[in-house]
Amino acid sequence: MEDEVDRLVAAWRRERPDLDVEPLEVLSRVSRLARHLDRARRLAFSEHGLEPWEFDVLTSLRRAGAPYQLSPGQLLTQTLVTSGTMTNRIDRLAKKGLVERLPDPSDRRGVLVRLTPEGRDRADEALAGLLAQERAILARLSQGQRADLAALLRQLTAPFDNIPG
């Protein structure tokens, strides 16, 4: 079965036979898949009234376990955004009643961000929707193929995820 990347690679091989375009066979597919995943994520989140960034913050808190709270700094680390962006996101989620700010008992100047019961429900529902979308995308692969693909992708992503600083 041919895909768009096969056609793209064939065209480059015809037009630039002097170049080794083999990396395109893998990475162009990863890039195209990422776009399809982004669409699936947006659909799953919008069905639950969430934006992707809202899902990221809410699920960071949800994964923290009871009482589902983190410091703004911990949220920064998990979501890879700037301090100003995180402050804005927390403000917006608090206005929606999905998170609340609490004084940090271990730091008089600090705050903790806690998931509200509504925030927890929305995060859980959106996650279930996302997983249904992702299962559909992976349905053509056997369980063994999915495990092999996960292992291969881990080899490519781990160096990026483990860069100091």
Image: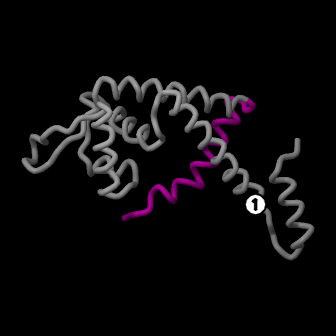
Mark count? 1
Highlighted range, magenta: 140-165
| Horizontal side of residue 21 vs 118, given as left or right | right
- Image coordinates for residue 17, horizontal then vertical, percent: 89, 72
The residue drawn where x is 70% and y is 50% is: 32
Q: What residue occupies the far right of the structure in this picture?
A: 14
The residue drawn where x is 37% and y is 36% is: 58
- Image coordinates for residue 24, horizontal then vertical, percent: 75, 60
| Circle 1 SS class | helix
Residue 146 is inside the magenta segment: yes
Secondary structure mostly taken by the magenta-highlighted segment of the chain: helix
Q: What residue occupies the far left of the structure in this picture?
A: 108
Q: Quick one: quadrant of the N terminus?
A: top right
The residue beneath circle 1 is 24
| Horizontal side of residue 26 vs 84, given as left or right | right
Residue 63 is inside the magenta segment: no
- Image coordinates for residue 111, horizontal then vertical, percent: 17, 44
Q: What residue occupies the far bottom of the structure in this picture?
A: 18
Please, what is the three-letter code of the amino acid marked with disc 1?
Answer: Leu
| Crowding at mark 1 (Cα within 10 Å: few <14, some 14-19, many 20+) | some
Res. 136 image quadrant: top right
Q: Nearer the viewer, residue 142 or 136?
A: 136
- Image coordinates for residue 40, horizontal then vertical, percent: 61, 36
Q: Nearer the viewer, residue 61 or 55?
A: 55
Q: Quick one: quadrant of the C terminus?
A: bottom left
The residue drawn where x is 63% and y is 36% is: 147
